[in-house]
Amino acid sequence: MPTRRSTAGLCVLAMAALAVASSACSTVRTGGNIFTAHDPGKNDPLSQPYVRILPAPPKPDATSAEIVSGFLAAAASFDDPTRTVAKQYLTSDAQRTWSPFDPVTVYDQAKLTTDGRGDDLTQAHVQLKGIRLGELDRDSHYVPRDASANNDLTLGFILVRVRGQWRISTAPSGLQLSNDDFKRAYRSFDLYFAAGEEDGLVSDQVWLPINPNQGLAKTLVQRLLVGPTTPLKGAVDSAFGGQVDDRDVNDVTVEGDTVVVDFTSDVVGAARVARYKRALSAQLSWTLKPLTEARRIEVRVNGEQFPGGPFIIDPRDYKSYDPNVVDANVQALFLRQGRLFVIDKDKDEPFTAGTGPARQLTSLAVADRSFSRVAGLEKGGGRIWVTGTAPGNSWQRWMEAPGLTSPSWDRHGDLWSVSRTGPRRSQVLRAREPGSPILVSAPDLEGTDVTAFRVARDGVRVAVVSDDGHGQQVLVGTISRSRTEVRNVHTLFPAEAGRQVADIAWRDASTLLVLTKNKNDRQLTAVSVTQRVTDTPRSAAGIETITAAPDPAPVLAGTSDGQVLMWDTQKRQWTPVEKNGASAPMYPLG
Amino acid sequence: MATETLPGSSGPARPGGRPKPKKKTRRTPRQIVRGVRRRARRAAGRVRRVWRRSLQLRVVTSTLMISMTVVAVLGFFLWQMIDTAILRGRLDSATAEVRANVTTVESYLNQPLAAAGKQTPSTQDDELSFSNEVDQAANALATRADGRYSVVILNPNLVGHDRGTNDVDSRSVPQKLRDSVHRAKDGETPAQYTPLYYVGRSEAVPALALGALVDDYEIYHFFPLADDVKTLSTVQQWLFVVGVALVLLLAAVASLVTRQVVTPVRLTRQAAERLAAGRLEERLKVRGEDDLARLAASFNEMASNLALKIHQLEELSQVQRQFVSDVSHELRTPLTTVRMAADLLYEGREDFDPATARAAELMQNQLERFESMLADLLEISRYDAGAATLDIDSVDMRDVVLRAVGDSQPLAERRATRLDLRLPGEPCMAEVDSRRVERILRNLLFNAIEHGEGRDIVVALGADRDAVAVAVRDHGVGLKPGEENMVFDRFWRADPSRARTIGGTGLGLAISREDAMLHGGWLQAWGMPGEGSQFRLSLPRQAGAELRGSPLPLVPPEIEMRRTWRGHATPVLSPAVEGAFDAD
């Protein structure tokens, strides 16, 4: 009897518990207080969406053209850095000789042609014809092909039958990627390296292969540790030092709002000196910026805290390392009757600098955004005068040489110019104080006529307008670390018959504006130094000089009839800002 | 209370039930196994015993079982419903997403050739504008998916048109799904739960795969279910925890409820036990008016009735004993007179005629018998009144035996019976009342001589550290089974038709047994028809000590040996004293 009673009680209890439990989760509230909805976030905030080719092994009884296109597709798939699947398309001999680590050729508009005679042949020839776009070096530096040159590409494949199936016995070395393949498999990133006294950064563009086995962030940090690409070798430093390589990165992960970069202990030595540690932090935060955005970065060593306290990098602390040095709010100076004016719509007063007689100046150079020093080229091109902006400062003569180009300051306070000592003879000069310019060697420039020489705002890259007898072209080089040599000079803007380069100006650390003129037209073109991509030129009638600052600061131009114009991006036209004999507008640096 | 026989332990009673004070010897594995098995069996027996004895345990256990079943079934259905609900929601949103994506892909793949073939010089802004329509479609899907799901596009007819987004591995696409995608009618979206593999990761993620066909292109969407699996496993864990908690709660409730019921029942049982042990004043507290209260009231009524009856019976018995005692006392005075008269007559019998002389002799004999019977009756009534006391002295048991044998010697000679004495060589001291022990032995010897039919009688004395024993063995007719205890009853005789030749009163063995029990000893009998009988007196060496065993066997050794040769099972010997066991 007691058992029966208790069982009944238990049943009632169980049902009551179930009823309570089921009623609790059966309804959703339709009211209540306001609460904040949080974004669940992506699985891996450091990754970006991408598309891969899924590599397929050769199909049985495929035609020779199918084998080649299958090989190209499998080689374009980046699942496996050693391209195991692509090698299945090769004969065993070819597998030994072909390496996917050779330089990459990028082409476009490809067509496959086969000699296409019957199946009874033992050998087949397939040709890929297209346009060569460029090459990717082993150090991830992309070299575009000169647009003007003949870039036709013909790649020959020889196929033989192996056990009745076509296999490639001779393939061009390295990866052959179409433009689509290249864009799919690589992402461009700017690496940042320290320059000068480790107080500024220089950007260095690389194309990194996507590796699905590891995050893009890890690949990026690995590449950063390897060092700068060829054009910047000898010109910049890596604060990580020379003792590290890509194996020193363990992982890059996200923990809450912090990105954790885990290195091996090889990195510890580089961060001993505070200056290098700051430069290292700047390099990391700037390089990872596209992926990490405003997140803080913590450096760990083998999964543990950095020796001697947590090493946390706040990107805001490293804004001063900006390779552009100035931002879009910067003001420009211009000349009117030998006096300096600030471009300002409300005020129209001469700048108090440069007492003494008004000099006949044709172009300016501004050392920093507070205008602490201004350099000007005297009419005739024989002297360069420098003045401070503090009241009472007078013009001092810094350089005196025949045929000087417009002066250019670098971010470290040195003044640069090139003297034309004779036909096809130029000498690069650098001055830190009045009187004694230092001769800088520039083997690639000394045998040409240099008409413009501008140091970029990062203080490392230089843009030069030179003429070696085949017309004026724009060259880009770098200043070596010791600042005694201009090297790594290569053509950025090739010469064209009947075209002259009137002026050049750096917009930011990697974009150069080029003002060209031919018989009846003047054009302004923006050229990217790292990608060598140009945008569509805009007309620039009557413009003599240009100056630019990072977007969205407007491009300013001086005309021959005494006006300063501003490019209005909305109306897409030039609008005057200063008139009455104004000339030679100039932003600081660049 | 220990009357239940345990299944599994039936069969011959094993002597292993008690710890043996053996020397430590090295045991063989078989012995160890046997020991383990024995211990396990004993533990099982103990559990079974607890199970049978505890009502509470049984109720709690059955509640546990039933509630576990109920909770398991309910939990299973609940979990199934949650599982279905979550996965259904997931499937619906996934299907909608796939539909939208398929439309997007169709617009890319079916765009006019002219639009697809545009070859604009790529600039930095549209870095990811592909000229190939598959790449355009895949890129659009990858951007839209943004890591939430993965897409695989396969084209079995064209070379190099297989695409995947992010790090999805192509082995994730199950062949079954590919087949059904080709068979599917318009508007159908085949779906399958499948493991999703990623490049560079060996372990798979559970995922929902949906397939669609656009022209020649198979488009597979993989929605990772890791979050849902996590949710479900959390729900599962909670269901389990709640279920276990519920079951334990129910068990606790059942335990509480049964405790309320069982406690009064247990109290009643204890009261009944005490009542049975003779504490007739035991009563239960009656609280309330429920069933248990009524049970207690009935119990109390029963107990008081019982006590009343027992009291009446005791009084009656007391009256009877008093009567016997009084009668015996009252008879002695006339008997003394009668005796004196009879002595006179007996002494002068030679002067009487033979018939009268014979009558005088007879009267003398019967008077003696009457006297001794009266004495025995008085002795017995002393025991009944609890007035018997012991006169303890340390004596050598050999002397006691020899004195008793000496007293019996004339009778034995008369019956041509030889008494065979087996006494130990050294003294055999014990704290006993020698007069009473002598009387016991005398009684046993007379009894043996009377029933010994002239054959030899063996009297053996044995001793160990704690006890001494005297065994008297005759080879007469023996005892029938069941008579071993009856021989000690008052006025019992084996064959009522047989005459008492020696003139025993029929109270001798009863008195002897009372004497033995007064010493804290045992008096036991063994007998077999045709084999004779043996009586054994076992006494503790120290007065008041408890007797644990006897130094002499109850069954004569030669009989025991013969029995083991024949392989007969030893019959269970009923002990003469309750609770005592033989230690042979």
Image (cartoon, helix red, strand yellow):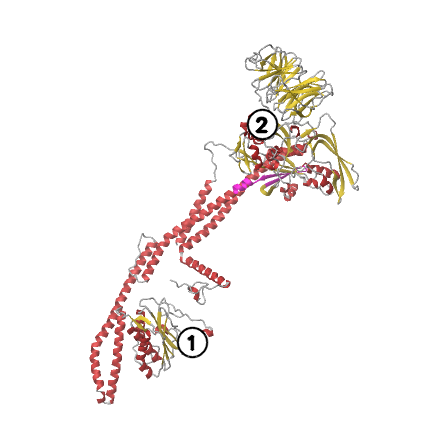
Magenta residue check for B281 = no
Indicate the quadrant containing the N terminus of chain A: top left, top right, bottom left or bottom right: bottom left
Residue assigned mark 1? B558
Which of B168/A459 is in front? A459
User: In the shown orientation, is residue B473 left or right of residue A49?
Assistant: left
- The correct choice, above or below, for A503 with respect to B104 in the image is above
Q: Which amino acid type corresponds to the residue marked 2 in the rendered image?
A: Glu
How packed mark 2 is, by other alpha carbons closer than 10 Å (few <14, some 14-19, many 20 or more), is many
Q: Quarter-wise, where is residue A188 in the image?
A: top right
Where does the magenta region start and end? Answer: B208-232
- Tell me: A251 left or right of A126: left
Look at the magenta stretch and give its main secondary structure: strand
The quadrant of the picture occupied by the C terminus of chain A is: top right
Q: Tell me if residue B210 is in the magenta stretch.
A: yes
In the rendering, which numbered label is found on residue A198? Answer: 2
The image's mark for residue B266 is none
Name the one closer to the observer, B189 or B510: B510
Mark 2, secondary structure of its residue: loop
